[in-house]
Amino acid sequence: MAVLEPKDFLTLSISSFSLLVSLISFALIYRQRAIENRRAIRQSLTDAVNSLTEVSLAMAKLKIENPHAPPDVVSLRRTYNSSRRYLANHSELLMEQIPKLTTDIDHNVLAVAFDAIGDYERAGAHWNSCVEASPAGPLRAMNLRGLARFLFGQGKFDQGRGKFEESLRINLPDDDSSRGLRADTCAMWSAAERESGFTDEAERRRSQAIQEATRISHKRKQTDMLKYINDLSQ
């Protein structure tokens, strides 16, 4: 068996070191490119969600300004719906590539969009993901009531009530912000019950909303909230 000379050990050491440096460099370059790729996808998702929001706002404005929907408005609505469907699908594909970088508001916008175009299964999935991705208690409370409203719209009244209850049970500081949030949630619950034909439960939740609103110490905010509750029940 051949005996390695000292110079052979030196050559082998240098080669091994060079290989190690190359592997480390490759790993760093790959990691940097992966980070840049995720950033690019996140930016694309942000742009798509913003565009989807703008289309939804334009659609809502069109409905308000043209309640009787003449033919040209109907055509424009179809165009908006096509854009909304495309943007929602595109956004969902982007989200699947960067699941750890998606936020509750991303899922919120997609849930509303899929609900609007009649894809209720995907809308429900995004509402649930929206709740799970909530970064703080107040946002989770708001996302839960959004899910509750969606469930009422699907005729799943008991499930919807459960989500409203879950929203109200979240432990929040006893301050004006939380009191206003709870009052708003109860008012939304009342509206959902009324729209679904449950007038007794609607009135009960309206009374609960008023009770929460009267606990707001800032008088102007209290007055505004009470007026909002009254307007919502008309």
Image (spheres, rainbow, N blue to C red):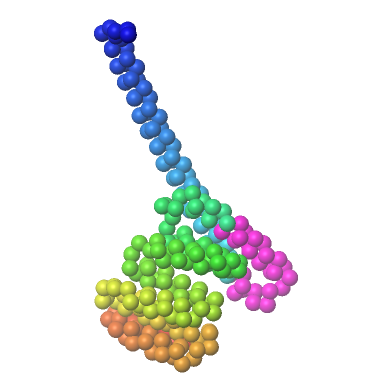
Q: Nearer the viewer, residue 101 or 1?
A: 1
Residue 74 colored magenta?
Answer: yes
State whether residue 97 is above or below residue 138.
Answer: above
* Residue at the extreme bottom: 200
How many numbered discs, if any?
Answer: 0
Asked whether, in this view, residue 165 is left or right of residue 6, the answer is right
At horizontal 55% and vertical 67% (from top left) the residue drawn is 121
In the depicted structure, whether residue 63 falls above or below residue 13: below
Q: Is residue 104 visible?
A: yes
Could you tell me residue 115's position as x and y percent?
Answer: 56, 68
Predominant secondary structure, magenta span? helix
Q: Position of residue 51 (x, y in %)?
A: 54, 57
The span picked out in magenta is 61-88
Image quarter for residue 87? bottom right
Residue 131 in the magenta stretch? The answer is: no
Within the image, what quadrant is residue 15 found in?
A: top left
- List x then y, in percent, for residue 4: 29, 9
Task: Tell me the residue at 32%/7% (across/down).
Answer: 2
Q: Residue at 44% across / 55% down in the picture? A: 102
Q: Position of residue 72 (x, y in %)?
A: 72, 68
Image point 49% across, 81% down: which residue?
Answer: 157
